[in-house]
């Protein structure tokens, strides 16, 4: 795991150091076990750290040759002899933290590539890395520790906060980004929203005069598009994660720590409150409010406001229990209709 041709390598690390970084506990006699890498239970060796977060894989733990494993307290006794137990109530979170120890994020190489085109009035922190063929417009600001990958375009007056990662061939206009924002390749931020008014001779485009404001620690997947606002700004709250191929319309306001999975479409002026989760290919109509901690299933169609804390599936979206009751009822009706009445046989 972690091919050295593609991923930075670090370590080895003591079990005690991993425990400190992840908040896990380790027995004193095991604290000095040296671990050289990370791997799943099925392929880990005595030099590797692994994890168990799902009871379905307890048998894989019993058969594993891993040198150490991050494990929930309830499964501590299932760790095989010779394997060090790093006990934590959140094994998967600890796995993410430990993996980052062994494979840290690539370092930034400060400087501007000779092929980059940078406007004279742009302000670039000397610790930022500007890659080949990057274009940075007038009055744009690039913060400390940023990495702008090949072919990215940063429009006039855009602000990129500290320690951001802007993927190859991304384009950013009319946008203000916070710190530690990650845009994967091909992201489009700040293009015109889909706004027009019917006129006697056809459609008239409505000027889109808002911005896109992105909070700290947001990640946006490859080829996702986020329109700038029309009369107000489009806002993405801090800590939100957006998958690949998502479309977010103008004036949308997304709260903090939301999760939006691939191919979701969110129409203009809709509000997602904090901690909303939307499954893949769901569609959200415009001018709605989706309440805090709502969960929307894949391929759902949401056409009305949703109170906080709901779990919805289907199109039109409805509460999970109601949806599956209807599915079960329709199935019973279909099966009943497929059987001939008593003492009769079908002619077809």
Image (spheres, rainbow, N blue to C red):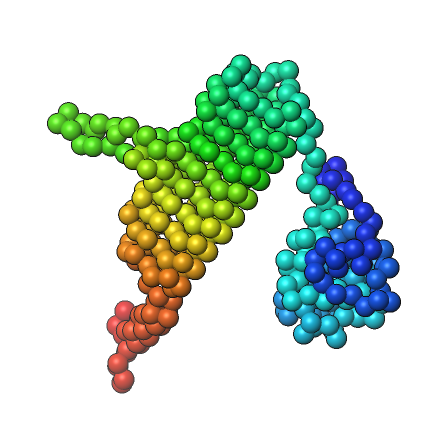
Q: Residue 42 location in percent, x, y?
A: 73, 60
Residue at left offset 67%, top offset 68%: 72
Q: Is residue 44 above or below residue 27?
A: above
Q: How many marks?
A: 0
Q: Residue 106 location in percent, x, y?
A: 69, 37
Q: Quadrant of residue 197?
A: top left
Residue at left offset 75%, top offset 48%: 102
Residue at left offset 18%, top offset 27%: 202
Residue at left offset 49%, top offset 46%: 238
Q: Indicate left or right for 87 with 34 as reference.
A: left
Q: Is residue 70 above or below residue 282?
A: below
**Quadrant assignment for the C terminus:** bottom left
Q: Is residue 318 above or below residue 114?
A: below
Q: Is residue 264 above or below residue 228?
A: below
Q: Quadrant of residue 25?
A: bottom right
Q: Nearer the viewer, residue 251 or 332?
A: 251
Could one spot residue 16 in this view of the protein?
A: yes
Q: Residue furthest bottom?
A: 343
Q: Indicate left or right for 141 with 22 as reference.
A: left
């Amino acid at each position: 795991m972690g091919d050295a041709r593609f991923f930075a390598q670090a370590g080895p690390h003591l079990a005690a150091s991993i425990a400190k970084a992840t908040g896990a506990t380790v027995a004193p006699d095991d604290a000095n076990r040296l671990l050289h890498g990370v791997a799943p239970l099925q392929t880990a060796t005595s030099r590797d750290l692994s994890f168990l977060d799902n009871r379905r894989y307890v048998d894989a733990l019993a058969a594993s040759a891993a040198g150490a494993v991050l494990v929930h307290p309830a499964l501590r006794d299932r760790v095989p002899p010779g394997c060090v137990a790093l006990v934590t109530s959140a094994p998967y979170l600890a796995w993410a933290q430990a993996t980052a120890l062994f494979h840290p994020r690539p370092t930034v190489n400060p400087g501007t590539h000779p092929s980059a085109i940078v406007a004279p009035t742009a302000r670039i922190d000397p610790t930022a890395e500007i890659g080949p063929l990057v274009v940075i417009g007038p009055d744009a600001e690039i913060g400390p520790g940023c990495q702008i990958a090949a072919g990215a375009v940063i429009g006039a007056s855009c602000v990129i906060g500290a320690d951001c990662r802007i993927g190859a061939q991304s384009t950013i206009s009319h946008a203000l980004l916070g710190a530690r924002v990650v845009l994967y390749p091909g992201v489009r931020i700040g293009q015109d929203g889909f706004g027009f008014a019917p006129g006697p001779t056809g459609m008239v485009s409505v000027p889109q005069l808002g911005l896109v404001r992105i909070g700290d620690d947001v990640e946006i997947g490859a080829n996702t598009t986020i329109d700038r606002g029309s009369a107000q700004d489009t806002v993405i709250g801090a800590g939100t994660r957006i998958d690949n191929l998502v479309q977010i319309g103008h004036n949308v306001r997304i709260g903090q720590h939301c999760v939006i999975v691939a191919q979701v479409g969110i129409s203009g002026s809709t509000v997602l409150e904090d901690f909303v989760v939307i499954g893949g290919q769901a569609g959200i109509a415009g001018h709605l409010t989706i309440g805090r901690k709502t969960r929307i299933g894949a391929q759902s169609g949401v056409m009305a406001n949703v109170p906080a804390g709901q779990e919805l599936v289907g199109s039109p979206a409805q509460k999970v229990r109601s949806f599956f009751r209807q599915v079960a009822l329709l199935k019973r009706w279909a099966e009943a209709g497929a059987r001939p009445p008593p003492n009769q046989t079908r002619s077809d």
